[in-house]
Amino acid sequence: MIPEFHRPLSLDRVGPQGLDMTVEATQAECAALAERMKLPAVLALTCTFHLIREGRDIVQARGVLRAEITQTCVVSLEDFDAPVEEVFQVRFVPSGEESDDIDPDSDDEIPFEGNQIDLGEAAVEQLGLALDPYPRMSGVEMPAAEDEPDPHPFAALRRLN
């Protein structure tokens, strides 16, 4: 299945000096991505990559993701627009050759098949990682917690004395 934001790039285009590429989502792709990511809207998505070959089949990518999205505030339940900017580094590796290293400081690996990497899908993955799981509108505070009721079943009777 072809993803909503598909920007294939042949590995042959990444030369010894590397390659700079920018991918930008169309309005229709943004709408499809919003549905996939369960967001009210993705208004814009652009990602710039600097690609460097590491051997024959591995490509390191440094990138900057910029997006404008609409999220729903977890406190007020109102929709609000939020900018997203994320600097990242990943490695494209042939499928099946991913590292078993679970070091959180190592680069994320994106598997690919054949001789093409998908810069669009890589950008979408970075957007997903950059999203705040509990978005809040600016200036909105969590309501104060009410005092916990006394858990004892006869606590109300004690107050009648």
Image (cartoon, grey):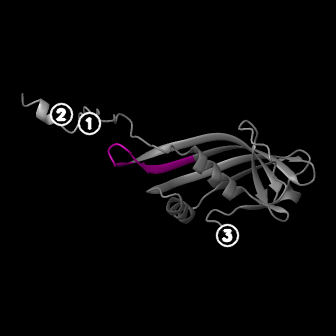
Select label 3 or label 2 by which is in front: 2
Instruction: Give whichever of 1, 102 is nearer the camera.
Output: 102
**Residue 23 location, x and y as percent?**
67, 55
Q: Is residue 47 left or right of residue 10?
A: left
Q: Are there few (<14), some (14-19), or many (20+) residues within 10 Å of tag 3? A: few
Q: Left or right of 141: which side holds 96?
A: right
Disc 1 versus disc 3: nearer the observer: 1
Q: Are marks 1 and 2 in contact (CB under 8 Å)?
A: yes
User: Residue at label 2?
Assistant: 155
- CB within 8 Å, label 3 to label 2: no
Q: Along the horizontal axis of the image, is 161 left or right of 85?
A: left
Report which residue position mark 1 lands on.
151
Q: Tag 3's secondary structure? A: loop
In the rendered image, residue 118 lying in the magenta stretch gets the answer: no
Of residue 46 and residue 60, the one placed in the foreground of this image is 60
Which quadrant: the C terminus? top left
Disc 1/disc 3 C-alpha distance (Å): 54 Å
Magenta residues, start to end: 67-79
Which sits earlier in the primary sequence, circle 1 or circle 3? 3
Q: Which residue is mark 3?
A: 2
Residue 1: percent from left, percent from top: 67, 72
| Quadrant hosting residue 160 | top left
The residue depicted at 81 percent of the width and 64 percent of the height is 113
Mark 1–mark 2 distance (CA, rounded to whole Å): 8 Å
Please, what is the three-letter code of the amino acid marked with disc 2? Ala
Q: Name the amino acid type tagged 3.
A: Ile
Q: Secondary structure at mark 1?
A: loop
Q: In the shown orientation, is residue 131 left or right of residue 71?
A: right
Considering only order in the chain, which callout, 2 or 3, is on the residue closer to the N terminus?
3
As for residue 73 lying within the magenta part, the answer is yes
Q: What residue is at 60 percent from the left and 58 percent from the top?
A: 25
